[in-house]
Image (cartoon, rainbow, N blue to C red):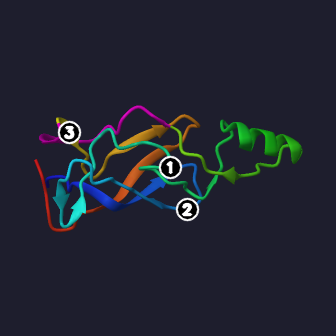
């Protein structure tokens, strides 16, 4: 089955977060899929494209590390500050928007604090791309 294109409103999840989040795609390229802006592999900017995932539970996060130390070693989650490392790794291979590959369902992006951000629901339900 072909991957679905990811659009604004897609449901995202981080392995170190406590809550899901949504993808935000600005309509800069003016390409819409099912009346919503389509994402490209470079759409991974914190607090613009990627909103927080609730609380971060990663011991590699400096804020979690400090709070855990203050709690005498009891893991203490702190507010999530997404820190993606590199672009998304999944793409719709033949489809480009503004010269960049379209982001397809099933994509992941690594967080600097050890979490893996994944697309749980692409947002586009009726459209597939190749």
How far apart, in angstroms, are the residues tagged by discs 2 and 3?
28 Å
Q: Position of residue 82 (x, y in %)?
A: 54, 45
Residue at left offset 55%, top offset 62%:
19
Using the rendered view, name the quadrant where residue 32 is placed: bottom left
Q: What residue span does the magenta drawing correspond to?
A: 84-98
Q: Residues within 10 Å of mark 3 (few under 14, many from 20)?
A: some
Q: Choose mark 2 or mark 3, whichever is in front.
A: 3
* Residue 119: image location, x then y, percent: 36, 54
The residue under the point 21% across, 67% down is: 125
Point 26% across, 49% down: residue: 28
| Left or right placement of residue 29 versus residue 46 in this view | left
Q: Quadrant of the N terminus?
A: bottom left
126 horizontally vs 75: left or right: left
Q: Is residue 15 above or below residue 122?
A: above
Secondary element under disc 2, as helix, strand or loop, is: loop
Whether the magenta-drawn stretch holds residue 87 is answered as: yes
Q: Position of residue 79 (x, y in %)?
A: 66, 53
Rounded to the nearest whole Å, what is the CA distance between mark 1 and mark 3?
Answer: 22 Å
Badges 2 and 3: C-beta atoms under 8 Å apart? no
Q: Residue at x 61, y 50 (%)?
A: 80
Which residue is more in the foreground, 36 or 67?
Answer: 36
Judge whether 92 appears above or below 24 on screen. above
The residue where tag 1 is placed is: 47
According to the picture, the residue beneath numbered tag 2 turns out to be 19
Q: Which residue is mark 3?
A: 101
| Proximity of marks 1 and 3: CB atoms separated by less than 8 Å | no
């Amino acid at each position: 089955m072909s991957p679905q294109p990811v659009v604004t409103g897609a449901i995202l999840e981080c392995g170190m977060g406590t809550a899901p989040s949504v993808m935000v795609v600005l309509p800069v390229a003016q390409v819409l899929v099912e009346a919503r802006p389509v994402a490209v592999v470079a759409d991974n900017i914190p607090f613009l494209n990627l909103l927080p995932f609730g609380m971060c539970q990663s011991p590699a996060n400096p804020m979690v590390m400090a709070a855990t130390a203050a709690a005498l070693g009891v893991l203490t989650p702190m507010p999530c500050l997404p820190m993606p490392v590199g672009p998304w790794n999944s793409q719709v291979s033949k489809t480009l928007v503004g010269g960049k590959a379209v982001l397809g369902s099933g994509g992941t992006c690594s967080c600097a604090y050890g979490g893996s951000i994944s697309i749980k629901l692409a947002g586009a339900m009726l459209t597939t791309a190749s």
